[in-house]
Amino acid sequence: MAGTAEVDVPLGNDGVPGVLTLPPHARGVIVFADGTAAGNAAVDKALIEARFGTLLAGLVAREERRLELRRSADRVTGAIDWLTGAALIEDLPPSLAGLPVGCFGSGTGAAAALVAAAERPDRIVAVVACGGRLDLAGPALRRVTAPTLLIAGGLDGEALRLDREAQAELACESRLEMVPGAGRLFDEPGAPERVSALARDWFLAHIG
């Protein structure tokens, strides 16, 4: 399969609708934690143009609570396991099983992506965490081995503080990037494009 298809991601007793895009000769596949966020459309487009496959699905709860984060992280890891398992049984292209996996998390999904990376170190090889409550990832931060890019808006002092604290906990390669003039939602003119470029370049450096 090369192209875009609607998929149903089986997670426990639920099926979560999503969109899987695989460009020809994909470098890897990026799973979006909080794939329903409107601002992720620009990131998704930039990654596909750089020959990354992407999976967007409603994996992350909106509430920023530890209980919801645990559920969200389980759904992210479940989606990654599904990509491999379904590829092996030929529900999805077999080539998916061998592709490296990255994770892009925004908002609450940023912490969920880091927890998932700690729990699937053999599958997730790079993470981009954009804004959000990274402190919710807690002790999992110290178990993340995948190179991690933290992105914060220059106008969001709280997110910058949390990102710096999270970066101090990470034992993996990491970098903190500030987007000047951007707030928590990165919806200011030029901010989505800057986030997209940062995410694309990070994944290219560690997957491409």
Image (cartoon, grey):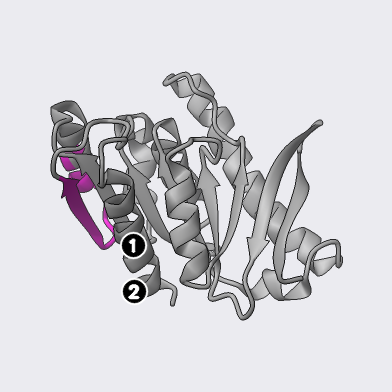
Residue 90 can be seen in this image: yes
Q: Amino acid at mark 2?
A: Ala
Q: Residue at x 55, y 32 (%)?
A: 60
Residue farthest to the front?
189
Report the residue marked by disc 1.
147
Asked whether disc 2 touches disc 1, contact meaning CB atoms under 8 Å apart, the reply is yes
Is residue 202 or residue 88 the one in the foreground?
202
Is residue 198 or residue 145 the one in the foreground?
198
**Which of disc 1 and disc 2 is earlier in sequence?**
1
The spot of residue 163 in percent (x, y) is 21, 40
Is residue 177 shown in magenta? yes
Q: Amino acid at mark 1?
A: Pro
Distance of mark 2 from mark 1, alpha carbons? 10 Å
In the rendered image, the vertical position of residue 32 relative to residue 205, given as above or below: above
- Secondary structure beneath dot 2 equals helix
Is residue 120 or residue 42 the one in the foreground?
42
Q: Which mark is residue 205?
A: 2
Q: Which residues are magenta?
A: 164-179
Q: Residue at x 72, y 53 (%)?
A: 82
Residue 118 can be seen in this image: no
- Secondary structure beneath dot 1 equals loop
Q: Determine crowd level at label 1: few under 14, some 14-19, many 20+ residues with C-alpha closer than 10 A.
A: many
